[in-house]
Image (cartoon, rainbow, N blue to C red):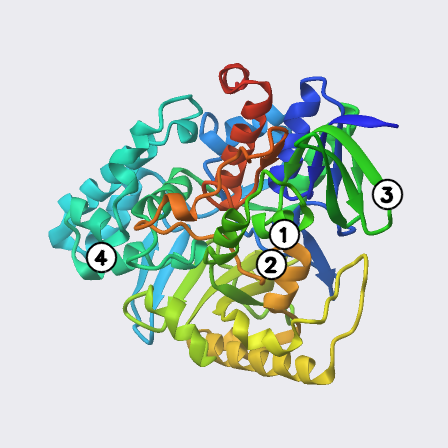
Amino acid sequence: MEQYDVVILGAGLGGMLCATLLSREGMRVAVIEQNKQVGGCLQTFSFDKKIFDSCVHYIGAMDEGQTQRRIFDLAGISDQLNLRRLDEDCFDEIIFADELQAYPQAQGAENFVSALQPFFPKEQQALRRYVELLQYVGDSFPLYNLRNGSPQEKEKVSSWSIPEGFQQAGVSQQLQHVLCGNNLLYAGQKNRTPFYVHALVMKSYMDSAYKCVGGSSQIAKALWQQIRLNGGEIFRNEQVVEIGMEGGRATYAQTKSGQCYYGKNFIANMHPTRLLNMLQAPAIKPVYKKRVEQMPNSVSACMLNVVFNPGTVKYRNHNIYWNKSADPFDAVNAVRDGAVHNYALYLTEDPQRPSYAESGAILAYMDTAATQQWQQTHNRSAEPSERCMEYENFKQERAAAMIELVGQRYPEIGSNVRSFKVATPLTFRDYMGTTDGSMYGIMTDVSFPEASRIPVKTKIPNLFFTGQNVNLHGVLGVSITALATCGALVGLDYLLKKIP
């Protein structure tokens, strides 16, 4: 019987990073992935001879010495990535309804203040307090600074709701709306989401913001190469259906094909509900399982990926966030009416025609209930299948509505779409492994932090969690969680000392 030191369930960023770091420590690692392509949210796909990102359109904190860069340095992949810095004076542009004004969010603390000050001339001090507050919140989370600390450090800021956090900075309501205009990055709810979620996400991009030229899958491919160099293995098109137990410990992961992967330790890079459904363990009490199942997930999304007629759409080296309401938080609840209440626009430059975009991705919230009637259908690379014509018509109608909406602001986009493909909550469910297609998995509730938080360690001593449902989602959040997961196995202090 072949036994691995660590069996990792799911080849998303968290699982791949854990596999890389642990295999570098000499552990024999196996990663089991249900899809053909590794990477989870880092996956890319192509149509009409263009490459598209499935989820990750830009990453933050990648300058020399910054947190994400140092984690990738530890993994040995930083030098292999092809990155392009977004505009320093505007990485994200915030727009409201039909207002002509567009608000820039800039890289660098001083630059961030300078870019917004002309629009809020009376709030220069408030902007400075806001930037200082982001730094203060970031400093309160030890692992975000790649150091070990005590849980008490973050307690002083963890209890702030988003409005309470902004009260600390003393910003006006209008400025708060601008600062939260890219809320699509974390799907926050005003009185439920902790302020630190906004702060940590915003700070990472304010530190530095980069696009992955050629697609975000390059991160997963670079990690895969490191895993193989370190003697690790990745098994694709293998869906785990059961975790075998013996003596209160996990012993093997069985896949749908009947294959069993035995291990000393197991790491689950998947939604906790999915893992608990694979377990028949006395250590997992029914009341705990029920609590996890009832944890609220984030809203889902519709992604429209489009190819433009060549040389027709101007390339913008920044991202665009449009909000129908003056308050960007309104879109999360308003989505239930089926309309489009916000969107993010991410453009990709045409290498043959510099200054023009060859393609774009339009992301908007979508309620998971919108695709409820087709939830019994599945379409994954390991088990491809076609959904009904009614579903295809639904996607076509949503695409038309999104193109029309974007075209109101950018006519050249509305009239120059050559081809497109649509991803719905079902797509995110099938390819990202969430239970319902939510974008960011379990959402932390500031009023009930312990009831909405998943720790790295489980009640089973050799079974651990990693991924976006632990601590914080996003590339940086997942990377930091991977450090915590690996630290539980090899020692966190030991691991942190190895970071360049």
Q: Amino acid at mark 3?
A: Gln
Say which residue label 3 marks.
259
| Mark 1 → mark 4, Cα distance in angstroms | 40 Å
Say which residue label 2 marks.
435
Residue 70, horizontal then vertical, whole percent: 51, 26
Cβ atoms at labels 1 and 2 below 8 Å apart: yes
Say which residue label 1 marks.
274
Q: Residues within 10 Å of mark 1 (few under 14, many from 20)?
A: some
Q: Earlier in the sequence, mark 1 or mark 2?
A: 1
Which disc, if any, is residue 175?
4
Query: Which marked residue is nearer to the observer: mark 1 or mark 4?
Result: 1
Cβ atoms at labels 3 and 2 below 8 Å apart: no
Q: Earlier in the sequence, mark 1 or mark 4?
A: 4
- Residue that appears at 30% across and 28% down: 153
Q: Earlier in the sequence, mark 4 or mark 2?
A: 4
Q: Residues within 10 Å of mark 2 (few under 14, many from 20)?
A: some
Q: Amino acid at mark 4?
A: Leu
Provide the secondary structure element on which disc 2 rests: loop
- Residue that appears at 88% across and 28% down: 1
| Mark 1 → mark 2, Cα distance in angstroms | 7 Å
Q: Amino acid at mark 2?
A: Thr
Q: In the shown orientation, is residue 308 left or right of residue 409?
A: right
Do we see residue 217 in this rendering?
A: yes
Q: Earlier in the sequence, mark 1 or mark 3?
A: 3
